[in-house]
Amino acid sequence: NRDHDAATAKTTLAKCLDVFGENVSVDLIFGAPSQSISEWLGDLTFVIDQGVNHVSSYQLTVERGTKLARQVNSSQVSLPDSHQAAEMYLEAVQLLKSRGLERYEISNFGRIGYECQHNIGYWSGGQYLGLGPGAHSRLGVGSDRRSLINHPSPEIWHTQVTRKGHGTAKEVVLDLKTVLGELIVTGLRRSEGIISSDWDNLCQRKILFVDFVKYLNNQTRPTGTNTAGFRMGQGQLEGLLWSDRQLKISRHHLSIADHIILNVYSHFLDFVSQL
């Protein structure tokens, strides 16, 4: 639970802008109880008017075991339905674009030059180290890629850090199928998609990007090429575009990326099984 209110959030935003100037990002959640589309667009307009150059927009997720989940299940509060939530998202995309904040990832919008390099590192298969309670890390590349998860309990995390020098609860060496599967799931959320060099570097060229492209060409009968020279998928992969150096979802289909990503991952598993 968050114990701040809207007034506190606005005051904090003003302080951040005063200290950090143009390098401030705001996270906003839509689909809140009883939230209307006009209220949602008003929130977006407010933060843009303050001079914010980067916005992350996420739909509210109701987690099991929380007070909100109990309230929703008992009909004490109501959430916007799926159609209303979808309209909120699409209206946000249009509003942010009209104000100069381009969608460069499904949930992230920024003016040119203000994209979050920290998050781009996640989405492109970079290494990252999580230090606090519950934090996740990805270290190494290729067959040496490791997943680390810290203890979620601050007390247990603190005790282990004091005794052992780290708060890691679980460490797993990832196989290449998992490593590239994560890149597909995160990378295709970006408007730029997956770049061949990121793919090949991440797996140390043991499963070449160009070979997966050849598989797509042979298996999915692309409908042709667009004006930028990308092959275009059809059927389950409608909306997917690819070339020898890039794999991405068209901007017209990015709003249904989860569906397309699932199908791309299924094709990837079939591709890997043939190696």
Image (cartoon, rainbow, N blue to C red):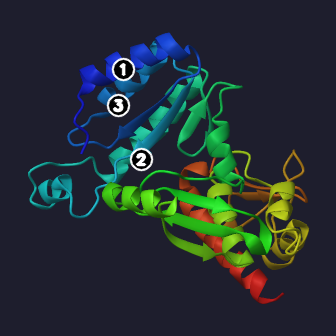
Residue 86's disc is 2
Residue 40's disc is 3
Q: Amino acid at mark 2?
A: Ala
Is residue 60 positioned above or below 237 on the image?
A: above
Report x, y in % for residue 29: 37, 39
Is residue 237 positioned above or below 247 on the image?
A: below
Q: Quick check: marks 3 and 1 in contact, CB under 8 Å?
A: no
Q: Amino acid at mark 1?
A: Thr
Residue 177's disc is none
Secondary structure of residue under mark 2: helix
From where the camera sits, is residue 70 visible? yes
The residues tagged by marks 3 and 1 sit, at their Cα atoms, a distance apart of 19 Å
Q: Quick check: marks 2 and 1 in contact, CB under 8 Å?
A: no
Pointer 2 or 3: first along the chain = 3
Q: What residue would you read off at disc 1? A: 12
Q: Quadrant of the N terminus?
A: top left
Q: Quadrant of the C terminus?
A: bottom right
Kindly identify the residue that appears in the image at 71 percent across and 69 percent down: 145
Report x, y in % for residue 198: 81, 56
Secondary structure of residue under mark 3: helix
Kindly identify the residue that appears in the image at 70 percent across and 81 percent down: 269
Packing grade of label 1 (10 A; few <14, some 14-19, many >=20) is few
Report x, y in % for residue 132: 46, 51
The residues tagged by marks 2 and 1 sit, at their Cα atoms, a distance apart of 29 Å
Kindly identify the residue that appears in the image at 33 percent across and 16 percent down: 11
Q: Amino acid at mark 3?
A: Trp
Horizontally, is 198 left or right of 36 in the view?
right
